[in-house]
Amino acid sequence: MAIDPEELEEIPPQGHVRVVYTGPVAPHWEIHRVFGDQRAIDEFRQRAMARLQLLPVYDPQFRRNRERVARDAEREHLILEWDLGDEPE
């Protein structure tokens, strides 16, 4: 049974994850849990790292994989925050 999009929006977030770009030397990414179930976040982290680990921000494949990670977070009802290191402090 499918869930209506309106009902999907009413489901509270199951966690919050921050994805941090660590720089041009691999590994390029760290994924931090802000809140949520540790096991669910760890499973998400494994999937996200499989997509991002060897990709720096400037790699063309990064944009496609970033969208895939975002869709995965949406399916898992996770708040996803990106820190690409290009914003002034």
Image (cartoon, rainbow, N blue to C red):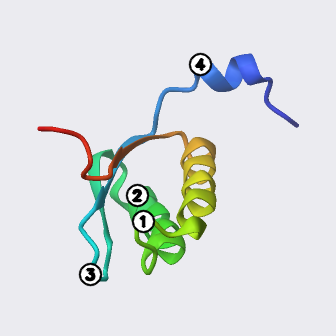
Question: Which amino acid does the dot numbered 2 rest on?
Answer: Ile
The quarter of the image holding the C terminus is top left
Which circle marks residue 12 in the picture? none
Question: Residue 35 at x, y = what percent?
Answer: 28, 43
Q: Which residue in the structure is indicated by mark 3?
A: 25
Query: Secondary structure beneath disc 4?
Result: helix
Question: Which amino acid does the dot numbered 1 rest on?
Answer: Arg
Residue 80 location, quadrant: top left
Q: Which residue in the structure is indicated by mark 2?
A: 41
Whole-angstrom CA distance, mark 4 to mark 3, is: 40 Å
Q: Which residue in the structure is indicated by mark 4?
A: 10
User: In the rendered structure, which disc, 2 or 3, sits on the residue that comes first in sequence?
Assistant: 3
Residue at the spot x=59%, y=63% of the render? 65
> How dense is the environment of label 4, judged by Cα within 10 Å: few (below 14), some, or many (20 and up)?
few
In the displayed structure image, the side of residue 13 where residue 76 appears, left or right: right
The quarter of the image holding the N terminus is top right
Query: Secondary structure beneath disc 1?
Result: helix
Asked whether the beta carbons under mark 2 and mark 1 sit within 8 Å of each other, the answer is yes
In the picture as drawn, the residue positioned furthest to the left comes out as 89
Q: Which residue in the structure is indicated by mark 1?
A: 45
Residue at the spot x=24%, y=67% of the render? 22
User: In the rendered structure, which disc, 4 or 2, sits on the residue that comes first in sequence?
Assistant: 4
User: In the rendered structure, which disc, 1 or 4, sits on the residue that comes first in sequence?
Assistant: 4
